Amino acid sequence: MATVVTPRAHEHAERLERVWKARPGLLGWLTTTDHKRIGLLYFFTSLTFFGAGGVEALLLRTQLLGPNQRLLTPEAYDQIFTMHGITMIFLFVIPMTTGAFGNYLIPLMIGARDMAFPRLNAISYWIYLGSGLFLYAGLAGGHGPNAGWFDYVPLASKAYNPAINIDFYGYGLIFNGVSSTAGAINIIVTILKLRAPGMSLNRMPLFCFAFLAVAFSLLFALPSLSLATLFLELDRQLGFHFYDTTHGGSPLLWQNLFWIFGHPEVYIIILPAFGIATSIIPTFVHRRMVMFPLVALAELLVAFLGFGVWVHHMFAVGLATVTTVYFAAVSLIIVIPSAIQLFAWITTILAGTPDYKTPLLWIVGFIVFFLIGGLSGITVAAIPFDQQVNASYYIVAHFHFVIFGAAVFPILGGMYYWFPKVTGRMYHEAAGKLSFWLVFLGTWVTFFPMHIVGLEGMPRRIFTYPSYVGWTALNMLESVGSYLLGAGLLLVVVNLAVSLRRGAPASENPWNGETLEWATSSPPPPYNYAVIPTVSSAYPMWDREDREHDVARLERGEGVLARGHETPASTVQDAELDEVLAMPPHSLLPLLLGIVLALMFIMLLVHHYLIALGIVGVGALGLAAWHGKEPRGE
């Protein structure tokens, strides 16, 4: 491993360094297929979009600070709250988790040298970046999406929204969906086929189970959203009538197609948080996770049941009672696998000896907010109650406790936890704890009063409100909380940015972490591991025999795979060595194909369909070149 300093080990490492070395400078980043570099590109891009979404949220809360505010015009408000939702879901949480955390950590956790499809990995990033810029170009030009992130028809139809605002939404989400689908396929194949020898499914990290569930959910949920937006664009551009009641269409078709994606999307967002929590908790409580097999099954079961609850967003549309009762029942049943994990996290903390450093604090905050958001979720599974609070600020409160409190808190905890591994530096612990408390208090003060104001009748998506309705004090409190929350998030960024330059040097495993990413240097070398690790338990870094065995194998030159860009493939169930795969090195094709796809969507937006067809032809030639070029080693 990276700690071995014998001459023979140095010889192997030097050869691997030559084989896997990235191109220098900007060209190296533009052509990279290294999963760690792509993970960093995802991280900084999604963090930038998170900043944009945060600014949008502060503008909304400032507008609602008091009655009859005029900071934003109604049209600007519509665009900003729509882009806030789109940004946080499609441009921040999913790419931050599957793109940044998944890309960087999964190969390291399973003992691989890269993702299964490195060039597909690269193009998924460039498509994601292109789709984000595409959507924000609309907002910058005053034509941002303006019908909410769920884009309900007929509000989004041509008759009521004739400008190109909704077309940015339709084409932008189809564009973005290509990236997420490619990333999901890559995660599935990587986890199932590139695990280190001995890492059978029952020894795989719980983090990987969570991301495997997320990837399958994305693969099955995204087609519904893409189909819905395709139908919408056919209605708007070519006069079809999928959602037009005057010609036999139905607006409920949009709601069904959207929420078939939209509620699994909630679990797509929350499952990576579960995976991060199950990585951080054992490390800082110094014991193995309670009920490991049940937690793994529960993560998969949450993803599966998530596809059976979408109609609980539609209890107020007049569906048959038998239909709504079924979906209400499933909405309650899905509490069971979530409760299994909640019980396991809390029991593991109580049964261990917790060290409340910054990463664990974020996970404790996550557990608190997940419990609150989960309990309010149970209330809206009750059909009569949901019909009363539907489209009120009560739903906004529930949604944000789940999406921000329960999904973003583990992301922030993960940033602190893996910061030493990625950078080779330690963060400032006192500043880290202060940032947690600011964000925790800001989250509580911002979102909890929304339950009350929602029960008092305040509708969601409201532009302003009169002074006599009695909502002023709570809205002012919520806005003050949002400023406190923003200050805490800013401190997170400042702490990590300063620590990147001034932090104390980090060792390979400063936390005594239990999973394989802590077996290599901080930051990891381009090839990840000098020798492909062997695994005999679910906690390989706490298994001394495994590590000593790998040191001996490196000295003998076994498992080094230094002939070229290579990584081993293993069998799906037992992770027995299957074959050695030649991996493609750096390539400019992913960037070029991403640009081609962006140009195609731009031409569709401006109705130049023949030019778009010609661009598709150029893309086909690029794909031919892609598949015609064989991977090479040195």
Image: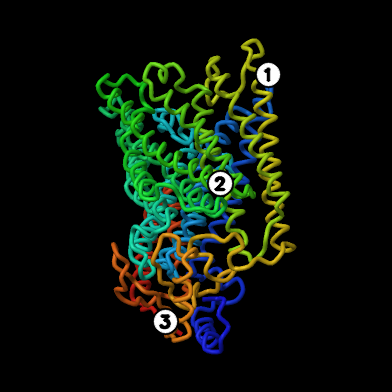
On screen, residue 619 above or below 158: below
User: Which numbered disc covers residue 136?
Assistant: 2
* Res 168 seen here: no
The kind of residue on which mark 1 rests is Ala
Between the C-alphas of marks 3 and 1, the distance is 65 Å
Dot 1: within a 10 Å radius of its alpha carbon, few (fewer than 14), some, or many (20 or more) residues?
Answer: few
Q: Upstream in the sequence, badge 3 or badge 2? A: 2
Q: Position of residue 1 (x, y in %)?
A: 51, 76
Left or right of 321? Residue 37 is: right
Q: In this view, does 524 lie to the left or right of 33?
A: right
Q: What element carries label 3?
A: loop
Q: Where is residue 592 in the image (x, y as percent from the top left)?
A: 47, 66
Q: Which of marks 2 and 1 is nearer the N terminus?
A: 2
Residue 561, disc = 3
What's the amino acid at mark 2? Tyr
> Could you say where residue 50 lies in the image, as x and y percent from the top left?
59, 46
Q: How far apart are the two marked residues, 2 and 1, measured between alpha carbons?
A: 33 Å
Q: Is residue 600 left or right of residue 580?
A: right
Mark 3–mark 2 distance (CA, rounded to whole Å): 44 Å
**Residue type, label 3:** Leu
Label 3 with label 2: CB-CB less than 8 Å: no
Picture residue at 73% right of the left edge, 58% below the top: 498
Q: Which residue is drawn at 37% across and 67% down?
A: 194
Seen at 39% across and 57% down, the residue is 182
Residue in front for this viewpoint, 240 or 302: 302
Q: Which residue in the protein does label 1 denote?
A: 473
Question: Which is more N-terminal, label 1 or label 3?
Answer: 1
- Regarding mark 2 in the picture, which secondary structure is present there? helix
